[in-house]
Image: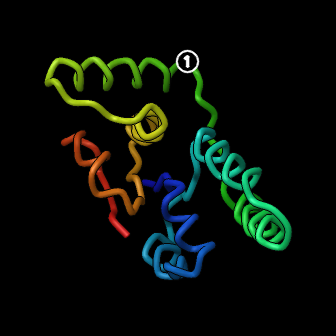
Amino acid sequence: MGTVIDSSVLIAAERGQLDPVPLLEEQPDDDLVVAAITVSELLHGLHRLGGVKRARAQAFIDRWLEHLPVVPFDLSIARTHATLAADLGARGARMGAHDLMIAATAVWLGYTVATRDRRSFARLPDLKVLYW
């Protein structure tokens, strides 16, 4: 069992809006990981910052990435992604491309997604989600 941490959780923690310690304590025996696209989202936000904010954000991201394995978007996850996307399309539902990649990573691994996004991930009824 494990948890894929969405960028919304890490961004809220970096901004001081969320204490990540309870998440870590609630999942002591679980693997905590991030999807590769989450790292891209975090680094994109970092590159948009300047000065002291950028330095603080860089240090924050670096600390997390020292401890969180990054799951690449590989062929198995791509197949899961395609299945989820087709299911959403058949139901007339949409989901952001990055969120769908995160969801596909979690589904492939059999993990839960930890997020603050109550809208996007709820579109996948079989996805296990922990809202923060």
Q: How is the image coloured?
A: rainbow
- Which one is in front, 60 or 55? 55
Q: Is residue 130 left or right of residue 5?
A: left
Local packing at callout 1 (Cα closer than 10 Å; few below 14, some 14-19, many 20+) is: few
Q: Give the vertical position of 78 relative to 32 (above or below).
A: above
Residue 76 image offset from top left, x and y in percent: 50, 21
Q: What quarter of the picture does the C terminus occupy?
A: bottom left
The residue most toward the left is: 91
Where, by quadrant of the figure, is residue 55 drawn? bottom right
Residue 1 image offset from top left, x and y in percent: 42, 54
Label 1: state its secondary structure. Answer: helix
Residue 118 image offset from top left, x and y in percent: 28, 57
Q: Is residue 70 left or right of residue 108?
A: right
- Amino acid of disc 1: Leu
Q: Is residue 113 left or right of residue 37?
A: left
In percent of the image, x 57 and y 81: which residue is there?
16
Q: Which residue is mark 1?
A: 75
In percent of the image, x 16 and y 24: which residue is there?
92
Residue 87 image offset from top left, x and y in percent: 22, 22
In percent of the image, x 41 and y 48: which residue is there?
111
Q: Count all numbered tags in the image, as a single digit.
A: 1
Q: Is residue 118 left or right of residue 114?
A: left
Q: Give the vertical position of 93 relative to 55 (above or below).
A: above
In percent of the image, x 49 and y 59: which residue is there?
8
Q: Give the vertical position of 55 relative to 73 (above or below).
A: below
